[in-house]
Image (tube, helix red, strand yellow):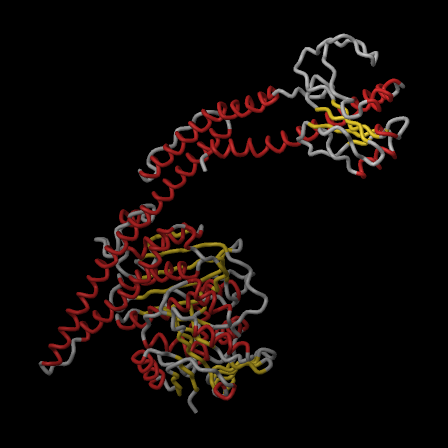
Amino acid sequence: MPDRILLIEDDQELGAQIVESLKKAGFDPTWWRAGRHLEPAHLSGLVLVILDLMLPSVYGLDILKELRASGAEVPVLVLSARNDTADKVRALKLGADDYMTKPFWPEELVERVRARIRRPALQRGDALEVGKLRLDLATRGATVDGGVVELTRVEFDLLAALARRPGVAVTRGWLVEHVLDPDREGNERTLDVHVSRLRKKLGAAVRVETVWGIGYRLGTGAEPA
Amino acid sequence: MKLRTRLVVATIGVTVPMVVLLMWLDGRARHQAAAVALSEGITRRLQNPDERYRCEDAPAAWGKPRPRGGPPGRDHAPPRRPPPFPMGAPPVHYAYDEALRSPNPAAPALSPAWARGADERDFYIVPRAWWSDDVDIVVRTPWGEGPCAYVLTHGTTTPGFIGALLPASPIWLLPLAAVLVAILVAVGPVIARIRRLTAAVQRSAAQGFADSVPVEGKDELGELARAFDAASREVRAQLAVKDQREQTLREFLSSTTHDVMIPLTVLQAHLTTLREAHAAGRAPDPLILTAAMDETHYIGALLHNLAVAAKLDAGEPGMIKGPVDLNALVTRVVSRHAPIARQRAIALEHAVPEQPLETEADVTMLEQAVSNVLYNAIRHNRTGGHVALILEPQPEERFRVRVIDDGPGIPPAQLERVAKRGQRGDAARTRAPDGQGLGLDIAHRVARLHGHDLRFTASEFGGLQVDLEGPTEPSRPEPKDQ
């Protein structure tokens, strides 16, 4: 079932385009052309509210205030035409989670919506799961698609560090500092060697991606490249 | 009311009641003294037993004033020397019988209350208005019967005769007049100075406070003139600031219009090309499409930059500092430019630390600064190039935002110029020949305003490496994002 998103936007054209983009991205948008009293019934099943501040009127902020006063915790992404610090500070203070300044690309909006409702990495107790990869942090065991993969201490730590933030680039500097054994001489070259060994052991099902200028990232397999 | 009139009125208002009070006190005292003197005179006279016979012989004629300085009368009164000041009329006595009737036709009516008063005391003072000169007392004769049972003695308080306390002549008005004249004379120059000052201030105001107000004297008026002078200087300064602002605004509007018109014109040309392709049944040229998207992206960035530039021109008050989540800021900036990087087939990567970094800044300005650096790297890269934005904590509670690219980079000489940019107030806007326009200038100015370090170096990947460093704030105990 697609995630339901409530869009509150008074501009006809912009509203229609946002709805179109969200639909294309696989969401189920509801579009309110005017600010209305938000009932708890409206909020059930919503994963996100996209709220145009409709500046210069403060109506959008009133809706936000009312929403937060009712105790609703649904994330709110605020759209603002005025790139104004005072507006942002006010919106964040009233409980907005994020804001976007016009103009924006439809892709940008979708990306920000996805980032806002992204589920954290599945971590059940001591286990980390990313796609077909499963890491048991207690026993330090790794499986890919159910098959056990034998990893060295450094390789496991490296993989765990990436799996904790799947899809997010981690800098080589951080990995050298936090994963490699400080007693032994560890540098970025050593790190690359560990990564290439790790890739061989994991096979094609789990991608440890090189990120240009940064370091490495564990591909989630879910998002299109 | 003019100052002079006001002073006169005030002086009169204060002195007249005082004079009236003094006159009242004086009149009372003189009445009292005259009454006592009269009573002493008549008592002494009535103590002479011959006086009873004289009175009862001719009660109608008794009591007429005796000629002064004449031969000594039978009343044994010693001859008096005339006093050196004007004298009042000598006292006159009227005799009344027990029924309060007088055979003397000139005698005033004697009220029974007065007679009762005379019965009770040595003598009774007939009440008179305080301004009156007349003093009447009533005494009961020692024998108290016959046609001369009561005597009314009439005198006056005129000085000289009965020793009044104050001189009666209007000479005491002289000090009052002197005070009045002194005030008016002393006030003259003060008024003249006030008039000069007023004229000077009006002249200064008429010329838009271009002239200063002349200051004369070290007294309160001098201070007033100094205060006027200071006020007019302040007004001059404010007017200058306002003029400067207006000038800035006019220049801003005109350059903004100019800056926005160029990319809009380019965009219109692109759109026209696309429409022509469509009309001719050809597929749109992806290069033109990308260029058109580029232009709109550029216009958006430009407008944001112009807004920030306006705030920067306004100076420090335009800033609203607050805690800024740098992770969120970097993510926003990357997602803003990701679509255009994708269009240009430039790989845009970013990394943020697991623990969000927070700093104290104006979020709009800082975001625009980072955005400009990143957009610059994308704009000047080539197809298939790479751009990476890395936010990392640094030692000593600092953060570093690093933008690296593998574009053509900038020659060392120009690098220095870019680094020095932002020290010029009138930075060339937008499309400067070296392509490093308003955006980097704003990045510089924002960094300087926040006390951040902004460094341009050659990146190890062949392009530019830009580092923005500043202090971090300890993150909040409960981060909003899970």
Tell me residue B85's x, y (percent): 66, 13
Q: Nearer the viewer, residue B381 or A84?
A: A84
Q: Looking at the picture, does residue B174 appear above or below residue B84?
A: below
Tell me residue B321's x, y (percent): 47, 57
> Which residue lies at the image location 30% right of the left edge and 62% below the top edge?
B303
> Which residue lies at the image location 52% right of the left edge and 55% below the top edge?
B395
Q: Based on the displayed image, in which of its 4 quarters is residue A10 positioned?
A: bottom left
Tell me residue B429's x, y (percent): 26, 54
Looking at the figure, which quarter contains the N terminus of chain B?
Answer: top left
Can the viewer see residue B164? yes
Q: Nearer the viewer, residue A25 or A207?
A: A25
Q: Looking at the picture, does residue B60 appear above or below residue A97?
A: above
Q: Is residue B115 left or right of residue A60?
A: right
Tell me residue B312's x, y (percent): 37, 53
Q: Is residue A17 left or right of residue B364?
A: left
Q: Based on the displayed image, in which of its 4 quarters is residue B348 positioned?
A: bottom left
Q: Is residue B93 left or right of residue B466?
A: right
Q: Based on the displayed image, in which of its 4 quarters is residue B135 positioned?
A: top right
> Which residue lies at the image location 55% right of the left edge and 63% below the top edge?
B475
What residue occupies the far front of the structure in this picture?
B57
Can the viewer see residue A142? no
Q: Looking at the picture, does residue B260 appear above or below residue B112?
A: below
Q: Nearer the viewer, residue A192 or B284?
A: B284
Q: Nearer the viewer, residue A157 or B8?
A: B8
